[in-house]
Amino acid sequence: MDDALIPRLFDAAKAAREQAHAPYSRFPVGAAVLDEQGRLHAGCNVENAAYPQGTCAEAGALAAMVLAGGRRLQAVLVVGEGAEPCTPCGGCRQKLREFGDDALPVLVADPSGLRARFTLGQLLPASFGPDHLTGTPR
Ligand code: THU
């Protein structure tokens, strides 16, 4: 990913965060992903009164990407506020793995700017991915 694209990813994730439905945690999150065609897709967390039914910002951004026909991730940027950088939860790391490899840049920001930069391989080492299923009998 060309780092010149980071401001666009940041703006999209920050704007998405402003649409979050997070009345229970009061922890709004926005995410933006860059697909293989260079298109941006964004999502926000959508919580639910039945708490486990809530969804993360990354899941929303991935759903938007898939709906638009995107299938490979070039970069991900998450915006959340707090003492610690808002790194993707474990479930979201696996969701990202479906469409990205170990080198995928995962950038973490708060509304003021970038706070940390990882690769998916750092966040989810020795991961299980689509390649594990190729060649296996079904
Ligand atoms: N959350 C996200 O949307 N993405 C993350 O990367 C971390 C956590 C959401 C889930 C829940 O709505 C709220 O933040 C508090 O956990």
Image (tube, rainbow, N blue to C red):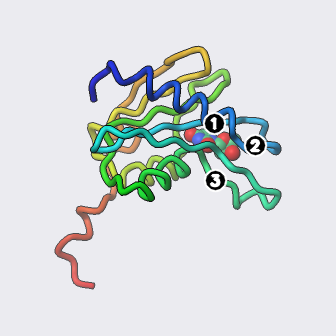
* Three-letter residue code for mark 1: Val
Q: Are marks 1 and 3 in contact (CB under 8 Å)?
A: no
Work out whether 125 lies above or below 10: below
Does ligand 1 reach within 8 Å of label 1's beta carbon? Answer: yes
Find disc 1 in the rendering and name its residue.
29
Does ligand 1 reach within 8 Å of label 3's beta carbon? Answer: yes
Q: CA distance from mark 1 to mark 3?
A: 11 Å
Work out whether 130 lies above or below 32: below
Q: Residue at x 35, y 52 (%)?
A: 70
Q: Are marks 2 and 1 in contact (CB under 8 Å)?
A: yes
Residue 9 in percent (x, y) is at 45, 29
Q: Estimate how packed mark 1 is, as few (under 14), some (14 to 19) or many (20 or more) residues with alpha carbons within 10 Å.
A: many
Does ligand 1 reach within 8 Å of label 2's beta carbon? Answer: yes
Find disc 2 in the rendering and name its residue.
22
Q: Earlier in the sequence, mark 1 or mark 3?
A: 1
Q: Quadrant of the C terminus?
A: bottom left
Q: Residue at x 73, y 51 (%)?
A: 47
Work out whether 57 lies above or below 110: below
